[in-house]
Amino acid sequence: MINHRGPEFAAMLARILDGMKPFFGTTRDVAMLTCAGSGGLEAAIVNTLSPGDRVLGVSIGSFGDRFAKIAGIYGADVTKVAVEWGQAADPAAIRDALLANPGYKAVLLTHNETSTGVMNPIGDLAAAIREASPDSLILVDSVSGLGAVPFEMDAWGVDVVVTGSQKAWMAAPGLAMIAASDRGWAATETARMPRFYLDIRTHRESAAAGQTPFTPAIAVVYQVDEGLRLMQAEGRDGIFARHEACAAASRAGLQALGFELFADPRFASKTVTAARLPDGHDWKVFNGAIKSHGVVLAGGQGKLTGKIFRLGHLGSVTVDEILGAIAVLERVSIEQGRRIEAGLAVGAAQAAALAIQTGGASGTGSAGPGATAGTPSEPAAAVPA
Ligand SMILES: Cc1ncc(COP(=O)(O)O)c(C=O)c1O
């Protein structure tokens, strides 16, 4: 460890806070907190809101539920819009909800709903919110999205965005990064929810002096610093194209294996893919066999337990690793008696990834040759929480 009140730490902190800004799509200040992503969500709430504030909690899955729950626990008057799991939030529906019932202080959105593998169209949602309710703060949980896909906080008019070190930043859990717009920072001055450790004003003050107000998770700070270095070497377009290619390979491979994808294909996540377990398919038996080949899948959460499984492709992950995972899924499926032609799923996954990596598929338009250049060589942590 180094002295977290010394010059090496100050340099590292500045590199991280500045280096993250392009990924947030902001020129405003970012704060780094030592806590899990959920601590970052709590910080978004307590720094901008007061007890009794009316809040619209738009939930498309279990992490949207969590965000709304935190606001409620601190005394916000939360109205929930619960979207069917597997679907994204509809900008027109959110606009109508705001127009029908004006006066919401904030709207809570989840960017990438890790529990269902759905990515919300934050730009479109923010535009609808701005149109219907210009004064509402827009608070976004992008714990499992930011850094892996484009995000334009300033251009979209988003007020607070939260991310976590263990996701796109390729580090261990332990840090949450939070950015706020001018309006978001102004809200921190009037918010009356109790806060001490998570008060981002003290974090901003300390950061100006090259420090954090409390002892940070220094080991994780090193990792995020290195993760960012790798990300800057790869470039944003390269990172985004790699995630897109991994997602396309995952979807094509799983579909070729006969699994029905869970998410509405228009809003399929670029960082985690969820697929339904066929009737009679025992998750524990299936997962046990997959695990014995060294691939860690995640099961369903909450009401989706035993009904879906999830393949993570976020952060330190390459197309080759996804192809390996699909090969394992293929082998186990065949061993468990499903009628599948060996090699078909891996071929489909490979073709889907190549179409993006060679610029031949529709996507963000950021794909191009060499999309995986500079990709870290460490094994993938393909495990959504
Ligand atoms: C979308 C989303 N929000 C919030 C969290 C909570 O983060 P943590 O588990 O670090 O508290 C997660 C974790 O996976 C997540 O995926």
Image (tube, rainbow, N blue to C red):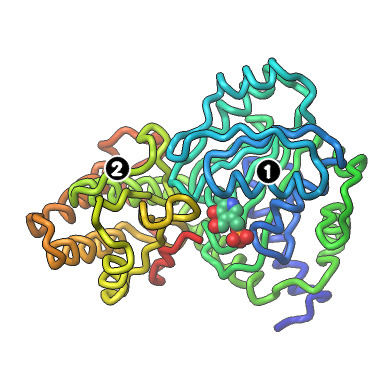
Residue toward you, 38 or 121: 38
Q: Secondary structure at mark 1?
A: helix
Name which residue type carries label 1. Answer: Ala
Taking the spot 40% from the left edge, 67% from the top edge, the residue there is: 380
Q: Is residue 301 left or right of residue 32?
A: left
Would residue 22 be visible to someone looking at this image?
A: no
Q: Residues within 10 Å of mark 1 (few under 14, many from 20)?
A: many
Number of numbered discs overlaid on the protein picture:
2
Q: Is mark 2 within 8 Å of ligand 1?
A: no
Q: Residue furthest front?
A: 280
What mark, if any, has residue 101 been given in the picture? none
Q: CA distance from mark 1 to mark 2?
A: 36 Å
Q: Quadrant of residue 299?
A: bottom left
Q: Is residue 371 left or right of residue 108?
A: left
List the residue tagged with mark 1: 68
Q: Residue 22 appears at what percent x and percent y?
A: 61, 45
Taking the spot 77% from the left edge, 68% from the top edge, the residue there is: 10
64, above or below 344, in the image: above
Name which residue type carries label 2. Answer: Ile
List the residue tagged with mark 2: 356
Q: Residues within 10 Å of mark 2 (few under 14, many from 20)?
A: many
Q: Secondary structure at mark 2?
A: helix
Q: Residue 381 appears at what percent x and percent y?
A: 43, 67
Q: Residue 205 appears at what percent x and percent y?
A: 88, 56
351, above or below 171, in the image: above
Residue toward you, 358 or 114: 114
Query: Where's the N terminus, which quadrant?
Result: bottom right
212, above or below 163, in the image: below
Residue toward you, 341 or 259: 259
Would residue 65 be visible to someone looking at this image?
A: yes
Where is ligand 1, by quadrant? bottom right
